[in-house]
Amino acid sequence: MTNHWIDLKNSDCILIMGSNAAENHPISFKYVTMAQQSGGKVISVDPRFTRTSSKADIYAPLRSGTDIAFLGGMIKYILENKLYNEDYVVNYTNATFLLNNDYAFKDGLFSGFDPQKKSYNKSTWTFVNDEKGIPKRDLTLKDPRCVINLLKDHYSRYDLALVSKITGTPEANLMEVYKAYAATGEKGKAGTIMYAMGWTQHTVGVQNIRAMSIIQSLLANMGVAGGGVNALRGESNVQGSTDQALLWHILPGYTNIPKASQASLDVFLASIKPESKDPMSVNWKQNYPKYAVSMFKSFFGENATKENEFGYHLLPKPDDGKSYSWLDIFDEMYKGSIKGFFAWGMNPACSSSNAGKVRKGMAKLDWMVNVNLFDNETGSFWKGPGMKPSKIKTEVFMLPAAVSVEKEGSITNSGRWMQWRYEGPKPLGNSKPDGDIIMELGNMLKEAYKKDGGQFPDPILKLKWDYMTNGKYDPHKIAKEINGYFLEDATVNNQAFKKGDLVPSFVFLQGDGKTSSGNWIYSGSYTGKGNMSARKSQKDVASNIGLFPEFAWAWPVNRRIIYNRAAVDMTGKPNDEKRWVVKYTFEQKDGKYVPGKWEGDVPDGPAPPLQNPDGTPRADGKHPFIMQKDGLAAIFGPGLADGPFPEHYEPMECPVEKNFMSGQLVNPTAPVYGTDADTFATCDPRFPYVGTTYRVSEHWQTGLMTRPQAWLLELQPQVFVEMSEELAKLKGIKNGERVKVASVRGAIECTAVVTKRFKPFKIGDSIVHEVGMPYNFGWRWPVSGKEESPNLLTPSTGDPNTRIPETKAFMVNISKIKRG
Amino acid sequence: MSKSFFIDTTVCTACRGCQVACKQWKNLPAEITKNRGTIENPADVSFNTYKVVRMREEVIDGKLRWLFFPEQCRHCIEPPCLDTAGDKSAIFKDDATGAVIYTAKTKGLNAKEIIESCPYNIPRKGKNGALAKCDMCLDRVQNGLLPACVKTCPTGAMNFGERDEMLAIANKRLGEVKKISQAARLLDADDVRVIYLVAYNPELYHKFAVASVDNLGITRQTALAKMFRPVKNIASGLV
């Protein structure tokens, strides 16, 4: 979230699309309800009418996997009716930038596509610079090569009729949504988006969110209270685990992982240091080298020296161009190249797309360690449906873990709030907090490498690993390590520090080895003033917008709304005087304006705004989007694998033979794997219906913590498939009967829920039916063993940028079960 | 001190936290259920289930509505079940709160008669012959806590407090909801301590959403006609 949960209450229009917040983030509806009761509109866009839709002012159905067509139509509507906020678009976004003359888009492909490699050469996705190397801008927005005009061109194809033909959303519904949401472009109005896995789990996942970012930038909704782009995380600490880099392609704090070809620290540091020639751009990411060196000091302590390039050569470096994502891990496991596997707090036998491939892959392991609260379908895969235990050699070890309330430490919620928790009851039996398991494992690895040597033992032997107190994992030591220390006496920014002092914030981090910080974005969370995440003050800011700045701690630097400098006009005056986030007051000296101060939220940097109160420009003013190289919101976004503007492509499995938008049916850069378990069925009469997966309020993730819980199983006892009355009639299926749902990859039995809440879609000239299943089930509980995971049906493909699997749109068939 | 619930169905998301919180606080056993072609479960209130969120899909004025109704004992101001029992050791009203309380001695009552007397079809008989239903979490309320279902509600659908205060909130919300749906009304507000706000015809939410002589067994009709007006005329005096 650029904003945070409580901030939802400040919104004039909440678009809930790609999420089902009422069911899956029930507490969020406290704030959604508050917004609605203050006159805000709530819009629900979902293939199925959900508990969220039941509370919405406007509901619009759409076929799964067509969100970009839907949002592209909105972009066209905003541009053609000039509903964007012109001041904001001209001054705070890159809409004015002139694009490389060779940048082009034709029939579904952007310039630079290499069909052999299935990837883009992005050399034409660039801006035209002036003689100083600063992007050229046309503040009149008239130049045909400026970003906003190419944006207009790009989305000119997304007219209402075509969008409706693709999405299946009736034109009247599209207009209703477009009008209500575009109204937030008015000065002082705020619109927000609540999205979750309904947007990310697609072959166009990142571009779904990019499309919304463009809309939010056009409507001046970034940086303001009640606005932003807000990802509802699927688990209470997913934000924290992402921040700490529980992903293969980054190191903590969103630092790129070094590549095998980056042979020295200097080469790597140069690659993570963007350069801007524009004195008005803060270009905060140019500080990344300091953060990286401080991180390496944290990883390797005294073993990281200037001479050994701060331990750079001890880091793992993925091969260039190779991916090591979830999909890739299980592809390799299936192919037999992985021997050992830790399943830690995960249940891939149910949570993974194409779970059948995953389960077969596990049978090829020598060993598996299952760290979890209870046994699950993963640890017991060898005795699951279709498995012959006598033929499986995998040895499985179970390490019982303590549940969250039994241990001390922090979680970081979707709103980036790091919140400290204390230990409640003691862990049961032999179960241990994850921290203890990791620490002990690390100690034993160190001993083993010390004793036996082995291939390249230094990364393990030289790792700093002193986070225990009296033989137990100490979460305070880790939290302080993440915050960072001064490792020598130093004077930084005119303040003197002693060796061993905690760093007050990342502003003080150094690139010469004098400081450490395990994760720069958390620097400031545990300082000389104490554990900031344990704070409980309920005092709000003057504008009463629910920031509660002394409750817990938000990264970065306790900023509650990111890009908040975009919430003020060029002179620092809030665009929304009532729900103001920050404001700047200049001082006057000898008849001249001199720097004054910001009030409200922690601003994105202390520099004054771009103009004086009388409208004269300031040489020391800064652009608001400090994390962007050019300081402006990226309407044109050249960084992604699949294009600088979002484009509609069909899901990898889809019900149409042709993409009505272009000659390119699917995302040309989406990953495809080559094993016999990687089959797809598009426009295959055997699998004529669109399938999707979701969650229910009553179960948690794969249901490991809830399916054995009788009160929750009472509410949702069985896996079900929801379908329209029309489809049920077509198939002769009665409400409540058990049916078979199959994809080309697998089949499961479900209870039919025949409902008015699913309706057939009119796609082109055809009627397309969609069905949906909750993914929260698995054979281990309930004890009947018959309530299996719908992920047995989903495919192994996903987004080319993140490789998150496409579990939200695939093709299935549904049939009655013939008994006896 | 006289207590009431205000249940605003217009903001209920049917998360069913209230259903689970009720079972958890009272440590009531789960029922073995099946998906019956709806996610509403269990199928009915029972000796072990005091609260069921009813879910109904209705097309109203051409638009699909999913109506949620967290059903529970209404704690009637003049409870017919109490009259019918005529045994204060089995069914009594807590003076301080107005909660209608069933004790283990309900075992000695004619269960069928008690159930039939309830205009909302709430009490249920257990295997041992005793009757059970919501008790307003009297143990919590007497200790200054909210009932478990109210405590857990994320959206403000479940409210509990002094009767005057609840009526005030109920009427304020009624005014707001009326602007969106003319059919909005409070259900039997004068007669019960669990006041529901609905946006549409209450019969669409649940058969027993409002009291009606039609809901009663023949034997009790005459005795209770004085209390409960026919459904068509129950326009709350508060509107």
Image: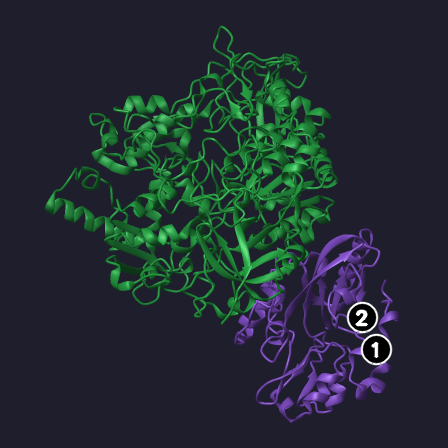
Chain colours: A green, B purple
Coordinates of residue B102 in the picture (x, y in percent) = 65, 84
Location of residue A732 by image quarter: bottom right
In the displayed structure image, the side of residue A458 where residue A110 appears, left or right: right
The chain ID associated with circle 2 is B
Q: Earlier in the sequence, mark 2 or mark 1?
A: 2
Mark 2 touches mark 1? (CB < 8 Å): yes
Residue positioned 76% across, 64% down in the render: B204
Give coordinates of residue A699: x percent, y percent: 51, 60
Relative to residue A673, is residue A348 depicted above or below?
Answer: below
Please say if B94 is above or below A140.
below
Q: What amino acid does circle 1 point to?
A: Phe
The percent coordinates of residue A483 (x first, y second) are 37, 39
Total marks shown come to: 2
Q: Give the number of the disc on residue A397.
A: none
CA neighbours of label 2 inside 10 A, class few (<14), some (14 to 19), many (20+): many
Helix, strand or loop for disc 1 = loop
Task: Left or right? Give the position of A412 relative to A38.
Answer: left
Between A243 and A68, the residue placed more toward the observer is A68
**Would you say residue A121 is visible in this rendering?**
yes
Q: Amino acid at mark 2?
A: Asp
Residue marked by disc 1:
B228
Please indicate, yes or no, whether residue A587 appears anywhere in the rendered image: no
- Secondary structure under badge 2? loop
Residue assigned mark 2: B188
Q: Are marks 2 and 1 on the same chain?
A: yes
Residue B23: percent from the left, percent from the top?
56, 72
In this view, the residue farthest toward the top is A131
Q: Work out whether residue B197 or residue B46 is closer to the camera in this orientation and state it.
A: B46
Residue that extends furthest to the bottom in the rendered view of this protein: B108
Residue shown at 50% from the left, 15% from the top: A279
Distance between mark 2 and mark 1 Cα atoms = 9 Å
